[in-house]
Image (cartoon, rainbow, N blue to C red):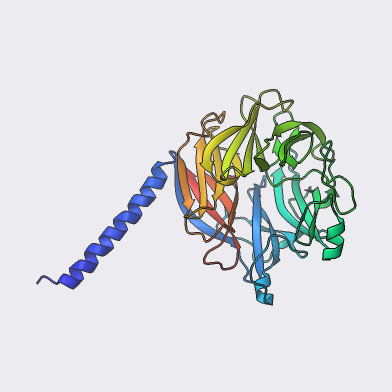
Amino acid sequence: MFKPRKSFWLITFVLVLMIQIARSDSSLKNAPGLTKLKDVVIYTNEYFHCAFPSVVKRSDGELLVAFRRAPDRRHFGQPGVKHTDPNSHLVMVRSKDGGESWSTEPEMLYAHPFGGSQDPCMVRLSDNSILCASYGWAVFDPETIAKMTNSSHIGNFAFMGGYLLRSRDGGSSWQGPIVPASVPEEKMVDIFGKPVPAFNRGAIYEGKNGNLYWAVASHAGHNAKHNGTHLMISNDKGNTWNYSSPIAWDDKITFNETSMYETPKGDLIAFMRTEGFDDHACLARSTDGGKSFGKWQDLGFQGHPLHALRLPDKRVLLVYGYRHAPQGIRCRVLDAECTNAAAAPEMILREDGSGFDLGYPWSTMISRDKVLVTYYFNQHDGPRYIAGTILKIK
């Protein structure tokens, strides 16, 4: 017997299911060679704002994820969350099963003696040591901040500049901080009135020649009104850093939060976040080992910051946060030399986020045919937590 109400709900359910499948198929077809397997929660705690992760894989297969953790001060009556906090510190969790499960109690990586630390950016080097770059903010009373005219500050937080840490035992202990040189003609000063040490949120890359390439942000060395990016190079595994060249600058656009990548041919690629440019991602290329960079290129799509990972077939997985509706995480697969970054199809990994306070993805191979993409996430303005997406490479 025909039952209109049951038939209506059955048809509605089928239509909704078809729409969801179509959306899923569309996102997967847009990134040839990738299949999303699952999302995982890496670390969450309702009392902490957790953000800005990086991930490395040790030689024994263990995964390490470092991130910034600070009190979620909404529990103390404050109206919202901020990215500057005197108690922000760097912590780390581990996985021994390919990202399926994670240690529950984070290990302390570093707490800066003068202020809060941000954005731990790890890279595993060819000698199996791990280098981690970070930077920090120190809190002062309003009267003191008002006197610090040459410093960069947000509210009553003054910028301290960058530093690096090193581990030779798989992250069990860390040495440092290593304070890098400043970019020449650096205009910003730190809390002691000295030019800020080089700093950045983004991936350091170890080249085939053993040099480390680090893109840093600075308002120096050119006449632009906004921060540009500059290349620093280390030939001693990060103990010392030497200025090489400007990467990108513009009178109207700010460049920052840059990740470096070296192609099989030896080109150095800087994947850059922008401000004042409708959140467009940009790229700059060096064909002479970082002595100079060509004119920066607008990639034509929105998202930041970006991280590049070489896949086993030498293609490049480019991941980035997406802080526009629907908020989440996205990626593209580029050719080996990153010549098609602007045209490569986009794949949506997550589109269930809330607001701008999410993203900052970082990825690593977890097996010959699987990738873990880590990031921080925000749903319904709840606790900010560290999450991941596991992808299969076809």
Q: In the visual, does 318 lie left or right of 152?
A: left
Residue lying at 90% horizontally and 52% vertically, measured from the top left: 192
Q: In the visual, does 360 lie left or right of 131?
A: left
Q: Residue 113, can we see it?
A: no
Image location (x, y in percent) of residue 15: 27, 58
In the rendered view, tell whether residue 88 sits above or below residue 346. Answer: below
Q: Quadrant of the C terminus?
A: top left
Q: In the visual, does 271 lie left or right of 240?
A: left
Image location (x, y in percent) of residue 162: 79, 48
Image location (x, y in percent) of residue 177: 84, 50
Q: Residue 343, can we see it?
A: yes
Q: In the visual, does 297 lie left or right of 93?
A: left
Residue lying at 51% horizontally and 59% vertically, measured from the top left: 353
Q: Residue furthest left?
A: 1
Number of marks in the image? 0
Q: In which quarter of the image is the N terminus?
A: bottom left
Foreground: 373 or 184? 184
Residue lying at 75% horizontally and 39% vertically, measured from the top left: 127
Foreground: 382 or 131? 382
The answer to which image quadrant residue 84 occupies is bottom right
Image location (x, y in percent) of residue 275: 63, 45
The answer to which image quadrant residue 225 occupies is top right
Foreground: 12 or 44? 12
The answer to which image quadrant residue 306 occupies is top right
